């Protein structure tokens, strides 16, 4: 058996991703350190790690984003490395740099790479330099609405205003009318400054009904970069992914091949070493794809890739951080079947308002080809301070149709009592004719929700009419 890549790793995160990393570490023979806020003292990741350290009160800024507390916990416990998971500090180059200065390995890409690709305007320029297609847009980010409007008028409306730093749809605005540009630009600037402490914005051409397709990459310090296929993440609500799948449906093999090659070429050009994704928008009418950004971290939806490629992305990421060469080459990567992931959120299915509280009765689904990544258990109380994601249900079938049916059965079997969840929304998606046909795009979920609301309104009108 190989010597463990590290003796002890601190996981600077919480919830299901902290558990995911803890399991990978334990399988590699690595001792783990969990960190937690006072609100997470009973969390499952705290119970399953070898050690745990309280790093502050519930607000993220005072705990999971508290760099000095995290570094102190790592030093005090003798952790050799820190795994940031996703979200929180996972794409914070300054945190990665501080880890290095303290002699702690940051399990992620090099600081230089994070800074280069974390700035969307610079990442775009790098893509153009390496002949990767990009959406027409401004060459530089800025905070001047009048200058940005000139750029928008050159490319033609509608346009998309986007944050240069950060992601998750924060500050993203679709502008159809030039008269609305100044107001929406300044609104976006305030939002991203509050979220990322960086008010810089850039503008790009808006592609209606586009598909969001990302390529999973992993590279090492020996200039090896490979892809593990692509994922379709088009099912989104307010730019937040809801359901992901691989392989992406209804894409020609030639388009798929060129997308993979473009992603690998860009990652190789920047000397990328870790796992990460290159994100593309795909025009469904022409199948032309455009680079939009790179995520220099582990993604929430990495399990679907693991399911079809029979790989462990997290373990490979840890080995790469420890300085080892990739354990497999591109020609050893093969896809087996089709996988789907449903993000189960604790939220009101009508209003989408978070629904924290105590879980009373929990039964996860099971069976061949079914995986559940979750940090919840019966009588666990979900705190109100963090993201509403409570579980990810992942399934693999021999083909897309089988995977869809398997997911419907898994959702029907899953019980999460005491709180409200979005499982009914997933059932609606999975049974919708457009989704079943593979005709997915980033506005499809909005259309499904609008049709549902219209149906409810019409039903209510009919019931009212019966009473007269």
Image (cartoon, rainbow, N blue to C red):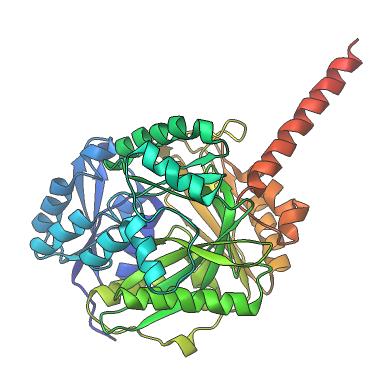
Quadrant where the N terminus sits is bottom left
**In the image, residue 436 lies at what x, y percent?**
74, 59
* Vertical order, 382 against 114 (above or below): above
**In the image, residue 169 lies at what x, y percent?**
45, 45
**In the image, residue 429 lies at what x, y percent?**
68, 50
| Residue depicted at 9% across the width and 57% down the height | 75
Q: Is residue 287 left or right of residue 204?
A: right
Q: Is residue 57 visible?
A: yes
Q: Is residue 385 visible?
A: no
Quadrant where the C terminus sits is top right
Q: How many marks?
A: 0
* Front residue of 34 and 188: 188
Residue that protrudes farthest toward the top in the picture: 468
| Residue depicted at 28% across the width and 35% down the height | 59
- Residue 385 location, quadrant: top left
| Residue depicted at 44% across the width and 66% down the height | 278
* Vertical order, 451 against 240 (above or below): above
**In the image, residue 23 lies at what x, y percent?**
36, 65
* Front residue of 133 and 275: 133
| Residue depicted at 59% across the width and 42% down the height | 422
Q: Is residue 177 left or right of residue 25?
A: right
* Vertical order, 70 against 225 (above or below): above
Q: Is residue 438 left or right of residue 334?
A: right
Residue that protrudes farthest toward the bottom in the picture: 331
* Front residue of 361 and 346: 346
- Residue 2 location, quadrant: bottom left
* Front residue of 447 and 54: 447
């Amino acid at each position: 058996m190989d010597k463990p890549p590290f003796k002890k790793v601190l996981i600077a995160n919480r919830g299901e991703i902290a558990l995911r990393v803890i399991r990978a570490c334990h399988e590699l023979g690595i001792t783990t350190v969990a960190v937690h806020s006072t609100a997470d003292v009973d969390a499952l990741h705290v119970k399953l790690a070898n050690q745990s350290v309280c790093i502050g009160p519930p607000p993220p800024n005072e705990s999971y984003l508290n760099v000095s507390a995290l570094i102190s916990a790592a030093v005090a416990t003798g952790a050799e490395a820190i795994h940031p998971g996703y979200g929180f500090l996972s794409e914070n180059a300054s945190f990665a740099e501080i880890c290095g200065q303290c002699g702690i390995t940051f399990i992620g890409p090099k600081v230089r790479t994070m800074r280069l690709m974390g700035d969307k305007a610079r990442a775009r320029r790098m893509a153009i330099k390496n002949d990767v297609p990009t959406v027409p847009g401004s060459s530089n980010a800025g905070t001047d609405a009048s200058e940005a409007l000139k750029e928008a008028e050159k490319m033609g409306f509608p346009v998309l205003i986007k944050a240069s730093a950060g992601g998750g749809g924060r500050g993203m605005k679709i502008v159809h009318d030039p008269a609305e540009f100044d107001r929406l630009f300044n609104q976006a600037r305030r939002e991203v400054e509050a979220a990322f402490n960086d008010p810089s914005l850039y503008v790009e051409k808006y592609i209606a009904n586009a598909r969001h397709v990302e390529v999973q990459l992993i590279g090492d310090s020996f200039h090896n970069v490979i892809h593990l296929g692509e994922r379709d993440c088009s099912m989104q609500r307010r730019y937040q992914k809801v359901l992901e799948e691989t392989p992406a449906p209804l894409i020609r093999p030639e388009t798929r091949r060129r997308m993979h090659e473009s992603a690998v070429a860009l990652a190789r050009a920047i000397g990328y070493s870790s796992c990460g994704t290159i994100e593309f928008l795909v025009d469904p009418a022409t199948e032309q794809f455009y680079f939009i950004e790179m995520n220099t971290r582990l993604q929430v939806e990495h399990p679907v890739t693991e399911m079809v490629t029979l790989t462990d992305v997290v373990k490979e990421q840890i080995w790469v951080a420890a300085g080892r060469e990739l354990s497999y080459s591109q020609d050893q990567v093969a896809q087996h079947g089709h996988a789907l992931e449903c993000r189960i959120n604790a939220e009101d299915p009508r209003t989408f308002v978070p629904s924290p509280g105590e879980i009373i009765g929990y039964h996860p689904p099971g069976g061949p080809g079914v995986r559940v990544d979750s940090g919840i258990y019966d009588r666990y109380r979900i705190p109100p301070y963090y993201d509403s994601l409570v579980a990810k249900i992942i399934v693999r079938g021999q083909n897309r149709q089988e995977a869809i049916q398997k997911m419907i059965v898994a959702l029907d079997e899953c019980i999460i009592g005491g709180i409200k969840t979005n499982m009914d929304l997933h059932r609606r998606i999975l049974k919708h004719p457009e989704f079943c046909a593979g005709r997915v795009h980033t506005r499809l979920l909005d259309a499904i929700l609008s049709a549902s609301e219209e149906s409810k309104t019409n039903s209510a009108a009919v019931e009212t009419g019966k009473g007269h």
